[in-house]
Image (cartoon, rainbow, N blue to C red):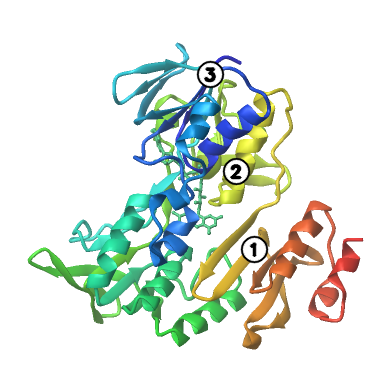
Amino acid sequence: TGPVIIVGAGHGGYQVAASLRQAGFSERICLINDEAHLPYQRPPLSKAYIKGSAGPESLMFRPEKFYQDQKIELIAGRTVSIDRAGHTVLLASGETLPYGHLVLATGARNRLLDLPNANLPDVKYLRILDDSEALRGIMPSKKRAVIIGAGFIGLEFAATARIKGLEVDVLELAPRVMARAVTAEVSEYFQERHREAGVRIHLGVQATSIEAEGGKVTGVSLSDGRHLPADLVVVGVGVLPNIELAAEAGLPVAAGIIVDEYLSTSDPDISAIGDCALFASPRFGSSLRLESVQNATDHARCLAARLTGDRKPYDSHPWFWSDQGDDKLQIAGLTTGYDRVVLRGDPAKKAFSAFCYHGERLLGIESINRAGDHMFGRRLQSMDRSITPEQAADESFDLKSALA
Ligand code: FAD
């Protein structure tokens, strides 16, 4: 193979390096890291980390010694271009590195708000450790947060900000929260739970301007004419995949770096994984770009296996989670495209699952505080089995019997 160069040291990049060594890969591995930290876990940034007081080391996948012991060269800096003919990458420092195989694990970046004053210090985003640190640092001096976007990150932050005693308003353009990702039943449950916690959720509206005085945010104006006072604005309006490096090297890109079911780009010596990859999925019969830890790490394992001689198409089952206040949401499968939702358990008891079907076919399960249902769903999917909507709705039906 020759040296493997991995661009991006997030969930996917770290995992490829670790899995390559685990599989006995003995050639050079360089992990190019443009963040000023050892590779770390992202999900806690909007959950435990921002709530607590633990230091950055609590997030690291591995201590520095691991990289030394495993001979994984962590190279600080940004990759600025790829020379495909010469098989090298150029770093911002001017250094070039030769590759036998190049892995693009560049992730995604925040979609920025295109409004005046959106670049003031009181307007924050949440993607990297430095963002979480910054928010943790300024929250104690803030009183009123307006959160733009009711996706997972916006809502996770909303719950934390309430716990920290801030007044919180959440703005969402769609008619319900997390509309792109979960069923209406689950959206409604979370809307109610956040409202109980004192979060004001405004649906069907968008921010039209951010007001400021002397460089400090004073409020946000809404498309319905209202004005909300605020001294902190947190923006969670989605991400854009980092595809530019690939595009500039002439690799096909669309809503992600285009790869086949083996995660290979059109250049057999370049692969792309994780948030940046738009991958062909025979299982789902379409191309997908997913934003989850499961997707990035399973992509990484599949690619590491291929680079060490075990070539198989990527075929893992998606799963995901989100923690919001005291509630844990877990999703097994991809629930988009359902035409029927069956509830198991009781939202009033704060523990239920939404089983999502297309016809009789179970697409996925969204579980709230029902870890057993979630694990059941993942095992059922791994066995390529299903249960009927009637069985799902019947609490006396023993789920385990479907796995026997
Ligand atoms: P990333 O982890 O984003 O890593 C990409 C890395 O590449 C970054 O460090 C980036 O700076 C670097 N990079 C980009 N371009 C270059 C370049 N040219 N040169 C060098 N380096 C470069 N997922 C879940 O499943 N569950 C959750 O609960 C969850 N919570 C989340 C909470 C937050 C706050 C965030 C931001 C994400 C969360 N996610 C969650 C999503 C999950 O973290 C991502 O899907 C995952 O990190 C994707 O891994 P990746 O390796 O593709 O990209």
Q: Earlier in the sequence, mark 1 or mark 2?
A: 2
Image location of residue 291, percent across then percent down: 53, 51
Say which of 44 and 402 sits in front.
Answer: 44
Image location of residue 186, percent across then percent down: 59, 75
Residue drawn at (66%, 70%), measured in percent from left and top? 367
Residue drawn at (41%, 58%), measured in percent from left and top? 54
Amino acid beneath label 2? Thr
The kind of secondary structure element at disc 3 is loop
Write down the residue under mark 3. 28
Position of residue 246 relative to residue 315, above or below, is above
Residue 331's disc is 1
Residue drawn at (86%, 81%), measured in percent from left and top? 396
The kind of secondary structure element at disc 1 is strand
Residue drawn at (40%, 31%), measured in percent from left and top? 245
Q: Gap in Å between the C-alphas at discs 2 and 3?
A: 21 Å
Q: Is residue 25 left or right of residue 66?
A: right
Question: Is residue 252 visible to the viewer in this orientation of the structure?
Answer: no
Disc 3 beta carbon < 8 A from ligand 1?
Answer: no
Q: Earlier in the sequence, mark 2 or mark 3?
A: 3
Which class describes the residues within 10 Å of circle 3: few (<14), some (14-19), or many (20+)? some
